[in-house]
Every structure is written in structure tokens, then in C-alpha cells.
Image: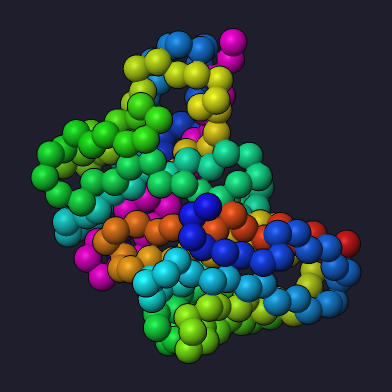
Amino acid sequence: AQSVTQLDSQVPVFEEAPVELRCNYSSSVSVYLFWYVQYPNQGLQLLLKYLSGSTLVKGINGFEAEFNKSQTSFHLRKPSVHISDTAEYFCAVSTSGSRLTFGEGTQLTVNP
Amino acid sequence: DSGVTQTPKHLITATGQRVTLRCSPRSGDLSVYWYQQSLDQGLQFLIQYYNGEERAKGNILERFSAQQFPDLHSELNLSSLELGDSALYFCASSVGNNYGYTFGSGTRLTVV
């Protein structure tokens, strides 16, 4: 079975600063990795996904993530955040034939 | 609009009552997943259906049940409601596990 650990429950940053949200996973087989964003009172929206190929994945809203197999990590990054990026971010993992397993979430708060 | 439709958006009901939440998946998606999201327990997987058949069960209480109909829409039935059942209930759909889920905007259930 796979599992996901999001290493920070809350990340406060100032506007225009870079941010990294950390995600580690555990699985004995090949994985597919996802980041979702949830704005207040809304559903989860897919930010980006890694299925295969290039380990650097670019998503919507200027976010990107890098798959590191040796470190079993899939950290999410953005070089310059905006107030509108304030939201909860979920990392998720699946393997072939299995459903997604979500992390506990990281609340990103961007302050002016 | 994600393509996954959940109704109703809000529901307020009394303890001991029964409610039905409805989900229409994105066109072409055969799998439907139900999640419960609360402040203290985070995002909890309840149950998955694939083309009308139950595929996986998570932390779903015996008071809760679900089904997926031939037209692929799904219903989540919650009975003998308790205050602790107050939460956001999300439906998601997918073509397969490997490509991520598309979430609906959720039903906010308040039990009073």
C-alpha cells in the first residue's frame, strides 16, 4: 500500500516570495503523483501530475513540481506567490490499479 | 465547471434524519469516489464505484451507504445523522486511477 506525508501543515509566506510545499511518498511499486489545490469553500482542483517522463512537471498558475525517485519526494514550488495562491494544497499518490491516497494537506497563507 | 455535478450544495437537517447526496460524474468517467472532509479528520475516502459496482471501501460508517446507477450517477445516503456527520462531502470521478480525479464542488451538510 502507498502513503503520503506532507511535511508542513502550515506555510506562511510573503507576497512575491518563493515557496516550496514538501511531499514525501511511500510505495514499493511505480507511482503516479498529483498535487491538488482547494480554495475556501470549493472542491479540489488538479494543479499538476506526474505520470512518466520528465521529472519536472509544470502545472497551472505557475506551479511546478519535481519527482525525485531516490528521495521519494514530489515537492511543489512556485518562484513568486500571490495573495490569490492562499489555499490548501494536497499531495496524492496512486499506483497502477489503485485509488488515490491523499496527504493531510498544507495550508499556504500568502501575506501582503 | 469541473464537469462533476453535486447536488444539493448545502443541506441543513436535524439529528436522526436521513439525507441523500447526488453526484453526476464527468462524461465518460466510469469511476465515482465519495470523500468526507471535516476540520478534525481531513479528507477521508468513503467509497468507490466503478461502472455500477462497488470497487473499494474506506472509512464509511454502517449508517452510510451508496450506489451507482446504470446512467453512472451516484447517490450517497446518510441515515441516523449525528452532529459529527456535519462536513463537506465531495464526489470525484475518473476514467481510471492513473490519471487523477476530477472533483465536484461538494455538498456542505450541517446537522443541527
Quadrant of residue A6 in the image? Answer: top left
Question: A6 or A107: nearer the eye?
Answer: A107
Q: Is residue A74 left or right of residue A80?
A: left
Q: Vertical placement of B9 versus A16: above or below?
A: below
Question: A37 or B61: nearer the eye?
Answer: A37
Q: Position of residue A111 (x, y in %)?
A: 58, 15
Q: Vertical placement of B74 versus B70: above or below?
A: above
What residue do we see at 34% from left, 57% from top?
Answer: B100
Q: Position of residue B62 (x, y in %)?
A: 64, 81
Magenta-tinted stretch? A91-112
Q: Position of residue B52 (x, y in %)?
A: 44, 86
What residue do we see at 40% from left, 15% from top?
Answer: A80
Q: Is residue A47 left or right of residue B104?
A: left
In the picture, the quarter occupied by the C terminus of chain B is bottom right
Chosen colour scheme? rainbow
Q: Vertical placement of B5 versus B64: above or below?
A: above
Question: B71 or A27: nearer the eye?
Answer: B71
Q: Vertical placement of A61 versus B78: above or below?
A: above
Question: B17 or B105: nearer the eye?
Answer: B105
